[in-house]
Amino acid sequence: MPLTLTLPKWYDLHTHLRQEGLMAPIIKSQLDMGCCGVLAMPNARPPVAKVRKDDALPYWSLEEYRDMVLEADGDAFDDFIVPLYLTKDTTPEMIEDGAKSGLLRAVKYYPPHGTTGADFSHPLEELLKTDVIKALEDNNVVMCIHGEEHGLAGEQYFDRKTNAEEFFYRERMPRLLEQFPTMKIVGEHMTTKVAVDLVKEAGDTIAASITPQHLIYTVGNLIQGFKYHLFCLPLVKFEEDRQALRDAVTDPNNTKFYAGTDSAAHTVKATDCGCAAGCFTGGVAPQLYAEGFELAGVDLSSAESQKAFEAFLCTIGQNFWGLEKSTETFTLTKEEQTVEMLPTPDGNITPLPIGIGNATIPWKVTV
Ligand SMILES: [Zn+2]
């Protein structure tokens, strides 16, 4: 009998459901990997950056996007969260109204021009001049942060001694924690030892999501043969960073680091003059997380390791977000699974394993 883990259905607490023809197939890929819910990031086209449908701003509202998700079979989820995209038009009144109505549970900060769909974002130093962040703290709204400094020159963006994420976690995050000591913060898709150390040392108001690709790969894997399906932001980093992530998630005492795939579908990943950022891991994420734990030296046949894995995938994030544990289960089996392309009306999506030349993966999910 191959090793089998029976797990409660889980929440992918950082994913991208996109819009229109992409949405239903992406939601299906989440359900197919045992998700009972998601946190769907708001960098759709247009971004989800207002609360109410009748607000005149040229964005989608939380109300409208919620309806779109429900219509694309998102009603199969137990629950889902859509953070509000912070833009120059976000106001403290909007935050208060959203929180009081129950529509708004979180916001997302993107560094301007820092990643796919980040063209509408507003610099953190500008947001700090307003009362928007204070309103988050006052209304118990979680601030999800893409923690990379924006506007850096190439040699500061990614170099041996520094990079955009380290800069953000050294310079910006400590001040944010100090200025807003009771605001709940999530450091999204964390990739560096600097960021991991800060979260470990800070209080319980901050948690972090970790993607499968950042647990499994380093920048060397991306550059060797330029495997552009592994190009995501923040970039995969160095061995020391990967080790810090692996140590954090496999620690039996972990209470802060949880699963959020940052799965990001692109029908056209690379063109003649560039490459879209994001790895698509819909349908295969629990399998890749299990592989990541094993690559970290964890023996998933031991009860203690299974506990740490289940905490990372199914418990820690849900507790942080106050989400209820699913009463349904799915299974992960140590058995080879063939990875399938995801067809959509807008074109095929290539899952990360196929994109980097792996037609099969060592673990299999059954829902
Ligand atoms: Zn993302």
Image (cartoon, helix red, strand yellow):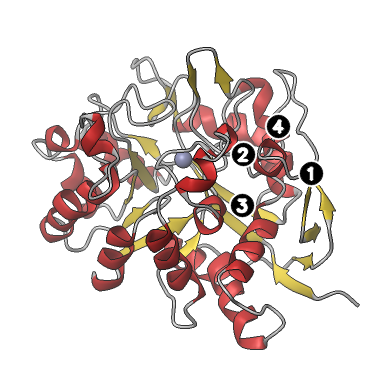
Q: Give, as a three-letter code, the residue at label 4.
A: Ala
Report if the CB atoms under discs 4 and 3 are less than 8 Å apart.
no
Q: Nearer the viewer, mark 1 or mark 4?
A: 1
Picture residue at 32% right of the left edge, 36% below the top? 110
| Helix, strand or loop under label 3 | strand
Between marks 1 and 3, how big is the CA–CA gap? 27 Å
Q: Which mark identifies residue 359?
A: 1
Quadrant location of the N terminus in the rendered image:
bottom right
Which image quadrant is residue 92 in?
top left
Location of mark 4 (residue):
24
- The answer to which of marks 3 and 2 sits earlier in the sequence is 3
Give the CA distance from mark 2 to mark 1: 14 Å
Q: Earlier in the sequence, mark 1 or mark 4?
A: 4
- Using the image as rendered, state which of residue 312 and residue 99 is in the foreground: 312
Measured in 3D between alpha carbons, the distance from the residue under mark 4 to the one under mark 3, in whole angstroms, is 14 Å
Residue 132 image point, x, y percent: 19, 39
Residue farthest to the left, as pictured: 129
Name the residue that disc number 3 marks: 37
89 up-or-down from 360: above or below: above
Three-letter code for the amino acid on which mark 1 is drawn: Ala
Q: Amino acid at mark 2?
A: Phe
Query: Label 1 to label 4, Cα distance in Å?
Result: 24 Å
Q: Nearer the viewer, mark 1 or mark 3?
A: 1
Task: Residue 280: give its label.
Answer: 2
